[in-house]
Amino acid sequence: MADALKGESLLDTGSRYFGTGTPGGVGLFMQPPGFIVDGDVVEVEVSKLGTLRNTVRDIS
């Protein structure tokens, strides 16, 4: 799905894109291992549009 949006893609008003993310446990195989934890900030930036910034919270 993400491959279809690489490069120059136009999303019309009302278009929806649901990113599927990364499978759970992938961070275990990073060197060094890395995981998102409470307090981390996750950012997604779209040039000429802006940045979406979310703070991760553990709700368990």
Image (cartoon, helix red, strand yellow):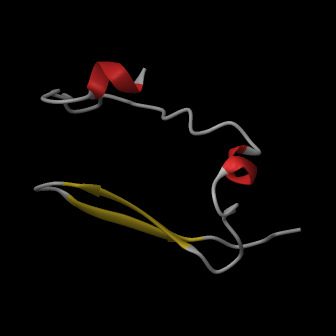
Q: Position of residue 25 (x, y in %)?
A: 76, 45
* The N terminus sits in image quarter: top left
Residue 37 location in percent, x, y?
Answer: 71, 71
Task: Quadrant for residue 56, please give it.
Answer: bottom right
The residue at 68%/52% (across/down) is 27
Residue projecting furthest to the bottom: 39
**Residue 34 percent coordinates (x, y):** 67, 63
User: Which one is nearer the viewer's eye here, 47 or 30?
Assistant: 30
Left or right: residue 37 versus residue 7 is right
Query: Relative to 45, is 29 above or below?
Result: above
Q: How many marks?
A: 0
What is the residue that sits farthest to the right in this orientation? 60
Given residues 42 and 31, the one toward you in this image is 31
- Viewport quadrant of the C terminus: bottom right
Q: Nearer the viewer, residue 49 or 8?
A: 8
State which quadrant residue 55 falls in.
bottom right
Q: Residue at x 56, y 32 (%)?
A: 20
Residue at image coords 68%, 36% = 23
Q: Position of residue 38 (x, y in %)?
A: 71, 76
The correct choice, above or below, for 29 with respect to 14 in the image is: below
Q: Using residue 49 as the reference point, say whether residue 24 is left or right of it.
A: right
Q: Where on the picture, by quarter, is residue 31?
A: bottom right
